[in-house]
Image (cartoon, grey):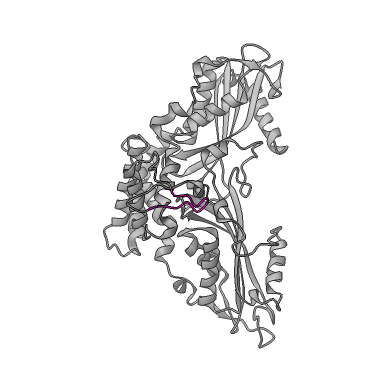
């Protein structure tokens, strides 16, 4: 099924069951906005301004429901502002006396409870892009009470569903547990991954195959927070916590609070933020203040500011001062009207053939393969990134010739830097290569979609593969199988 047909079917299903209206009502039920979804509508209007700023028509097929989808994603992704920890924990404390009247009633004196590998997504407060979190929570029970284990995950999710940075997220979860279940101590450890900007992804040497935890091109940090007995050097709880994590191959040795430099986390922190609305904005990474407005449309920055306000945040909070600018900078990577500039003068019709490299699968079959070309694009349905690798195979007309890898990377970048769907991206790359080599082209795109793993469905670890074949690849099963086997060999060997 093509992307447009799929969008039509989904739209029809939504209209029949009233899905959109139901979700809007649920999102706004706890926001204090009454029966009218004011916050959702305000975000929708802001998204239309952003689409217009990108040179897009928000009424075209594939985009006309994007404002509503983005509004729902933002509201769902920040629902933690409308939740209270005490409402979650209340009624979930159970008597479980140990063998001693001292500390640790979970199975006896000195007891420790740890819940590992809680998969979460949060929104980065610096750029509004989702980041992936693997959370580990521990506590030392007291008062002959233990808390329902699922509540630990739910408490972590409350604070993940807010605009965050890793250290604050760890501190918020730890503090909430300490204050609401009154343990003798609480500990939280987080592994966090933040996606890079497209230009950084494009320059990754030897890109690896996408996976759940080895996210291609993402910045990784580890942070922790602890209280009570976990801070007592005379007690072993912190070491026990680390040892229990090590049982699952999780090593946090040397990890301490504020153990990573703040400028290394979000890629947007390195940007100089221009003066806006009379307020000077200082870049946390270099301390410089720029008076240059930059190539950012003020209407787009204002639109993002209104989104922050609709989420219940204060846009003038010091951590959010540069956020609208940073988010617009991210979106501008996918500006529709600027695609020709991103090609750097590259003309598909004037490709020069070059000596072939070791990328050839079989010299007799004249099949060339160029594998693991990294890319990052923006889903036009939710304005969330999807990223991964592109594999390209083609037949050439002259044996011993081929397209340089750098040129094919430019083709991938060219079609990735716009609002996209993966099916269309795959077809466009295949068509571009087939224009040059008319005998045949085959493209396989493997990608992880943030809209699949950061929204309600939260299918962490899922990935999508799409295939487009043209010319001889569509009529020669052996050639197609040979190219797919080459990809498989590359994946298994770590290439």
302 sits left or right of 84 in the view: left
Residue 412, placed above or below residue 11:
above
282 sits left or right of 71 in the view: right
Q: Residue furthest top?
A: 398
Percent position of residue 63, x then y: 36, 38
Task: Characterize the magenta stretch by its predominant secondary structure.
Answer: loop
Percent position of residue 270, x then y: 51, 47
Is-magenta flag for residue 288?
A: yes
23 sits left or right of 400 in the view: left
Residue 259, placed above or below residue 388:
below
Percent position of residue 11, x then y: 36, 42
Percent position of residue 259, x then y: 62, 60
Is-magenta flag for residue 80?
A: no
Quarter assignment of residue 209: top right
Foreground residue among 478 and 323 = 323
Foreground residue among 124 and 245 = 124
Is any atom of residue 388 visible in this view? Answer: no
Residue located 60% across and 57% down the image: 260
112 sits left or right of 277 in the view: right
Residue 62, placed above or below residue 358:
below
- The count of marks equals 0
Which span of residues is magenta-colored? 280-289
Residue 407, placed above or below residue 73:
above
Q: Residue furthest bottom?
A: 101
Is any atom of residue 349 visible in this view? Answer: yes
Quadrant, the C terminus: top right
């Amino acid at each position: 099924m093509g992307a447009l047909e799929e969008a039509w079917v989904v739209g029809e299903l939504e209209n029949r069951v009233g899905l959109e209206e139901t979700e809007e009502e649920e999102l706004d039920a706890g926001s204090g906005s009454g029966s009218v979804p004011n916050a959702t509508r305000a975000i929708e209007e802001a998204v239309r301004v952003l689409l217009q700023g990108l040179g897009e028509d928000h009424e075209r097929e594939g985009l006309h429901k994007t404002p509503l989808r983005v509004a729902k994603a933002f509201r769902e992704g920040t629902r933690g502002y409308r939740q209270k920890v005490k409402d979650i924990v209340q009624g979930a404390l159970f008597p479980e006396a140990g063998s001693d009247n001292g500390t640790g009633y979970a199975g006896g004196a000195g007891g420790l409870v740890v819940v590992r590998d809680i998969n979460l997504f949060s929104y980065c407060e610096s750029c509004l892009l989702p980041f992936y979190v693997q959370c580990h929570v521990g506590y030392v029970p007291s008062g002959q009470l233990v808390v329902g284990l699922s509540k630990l995950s739910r408490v972590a999710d409350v604070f993940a569903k807010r605009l965050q940075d890793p250290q604050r997220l760890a501190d918020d979860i730890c503090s909430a547990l300490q204050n609401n279940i009154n343990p003798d101590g609480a500990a939280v450890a987080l592994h966090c991954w933040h996606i890079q900007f497209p230009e950084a992804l494009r320059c990754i040497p030897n890109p690896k195959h996408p996976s759940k935890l080895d996210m291609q091109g993402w910045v990784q940090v580890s942070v922790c927070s602890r209280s009570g007995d976990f801070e007592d050097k005379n007690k072993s709880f912190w070491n026990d916590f680390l040892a229990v994590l090590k049982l699952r191959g999780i090593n946090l040795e040397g990890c301490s609070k504020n153990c990573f430099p703040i400028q290394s986390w979000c890629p947007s922190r390195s940007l100089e933020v221009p003066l806006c609305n009379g307020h000077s904005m200082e870049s946390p990474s270099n301390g410089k203040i720029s008076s240059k407005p930059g190539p950012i449309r003020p209407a787009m920055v204002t639109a993002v500011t209104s989104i922050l306000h609709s989420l219940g945040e204060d846009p003038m909070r010091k951590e959010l001062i540069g956020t609208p600018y940073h988010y617009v900078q991210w979106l501008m990577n996918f500006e529709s009207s600027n695609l020709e500039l991103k090609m750097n003068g590259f003309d598909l019709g004037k490709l020069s053939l070059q000596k072939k490299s070791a990328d050839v699968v079989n010299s007799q079959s004249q099949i060339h393969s160029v594998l693991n070309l990294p890319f990052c694009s923006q889903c036009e349905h939710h304005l969330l990134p999807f990223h991964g690798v592109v594999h390209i195979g083609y037949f050439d007309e002259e044996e011993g010739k081929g397209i340089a890898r750098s040129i094919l990377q430019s083709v991938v970048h060219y079609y990735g830097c716009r609002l996209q769907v993966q099916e269309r991206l795959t077809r466009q790359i295949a068509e571009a290569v087939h224009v040059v080599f008319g005998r045949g082209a085959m493209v396989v795109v493997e990608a992880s979609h943030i809209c699949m793993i950061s929204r309600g469905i939260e299918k962490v670890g899922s990935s999508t593969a799409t295939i487009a074949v043209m010319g001889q690849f569509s009529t020669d099963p052996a050639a197609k199988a040979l190219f797919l086997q080459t990809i498989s060999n590359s994946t298994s060997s770590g290439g």
